[in-house]
Image (spheres, helix red, strand yellow):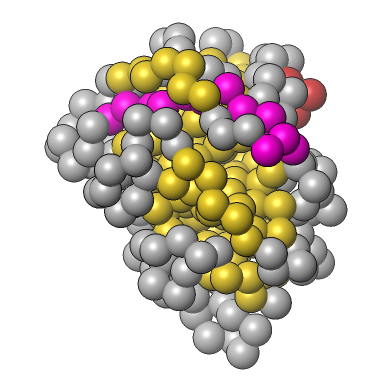
Amino acid sequence: MRLATGVNEASDVCALPGDRFLAVSDVAGAAGIVALGGQTASVPLEQLTRAPSGLEGVAYNEARKLLVVSSEEARTLHVYDWDALSTTAPHLQRVVTVPLGGKANKGVEGLASLPAHLSPTGRDQLLLVKEGDPRMLALLEADGTGTLQRIQVDPRAEEACTDFSGVAVDPLTGHVWICSDETGRAAELKLVLAGGAWHAELVSEPLELKDADGQPLQRVEGLAFSSEGDLFVLTENERVLHHLARQ
């Protein structure tokens, strides 16, 4: 199954309550909701109404009703109060600058919410990935604040995913998935906090991302999971979500 997002140059996706998904664009200051039935709707993002937006990441924390989007080159996170089940527009709460280092055009490429019941810390947190220079998987507090905590990624996952283009959390296992635009692969990782250091251990063989016809997916920009644990893969040029049923 393919779901059209209705979003130009879709750059990331996250899951919403009710088995819906929210995709953002790096050329427009609005997000697009898509339901499993194919219905779509536009969501305006306060203070991001002028193109190009530069958006590259999106995450939604259902418990706290927080929507976070990242502007890559500005290296900022826009944090909104938003009840995704309501008809009200997101309200901007704060803008956070993320200290990443490296080249200015390599910022936050993808975001994911890590719920408290799945987090090794027992509290809600925000995951982010940086595409390169260097590649990075890291944690912040749920609202984008706090000290950036870098996670040491299993070298086998780094070999499979030569850039980090998106990140998601499996709601059934708590495992973290990262994907790669360059290789068209995804890697399943288990977060471990030991001795004050974070590690992401490879759980299974990296997944080759393919469409319903068995062709490799191109321009993979994001991942999201349904409530039943099915994987949905966002491809930028096609502006669609590809449904990969759970095995």
Residue 79 lies within the magenta run: yes
Q: Is residue 195 left or right of residue 230?
A: left
| Residue at the spot 52% in from the left edge and 24% down from the top edge | 91
Q: Position of residue 176 (x, y in %)?
A: 62, 42
Is 191 within the magenta?
Answer: no
Q: Which residues are magenta?
A: 75-87
Percent coordinates x, y for residue 213 in the rendering? 61, 89
In the rendering, at what x and y percent does residue 202 appear?
60, 46
**Residue sitting at the far front:** 87
Q: Quadrant of the N terminus?
A: bottom right
On the question of residue 203 being in view, the answer is no
Q: Is residue 97 visible?
A: yes
Residue located at (59% from left, 80% from top)? 211
Above or below, 143 relative to 39: above
Query: Residue 189: x percent and y percent?
Result: 61, 43
What residue do we see at 48% from left, 16% from top? Answer: 93
Q: Residue at x 40, y 53 (%)?
A: 25
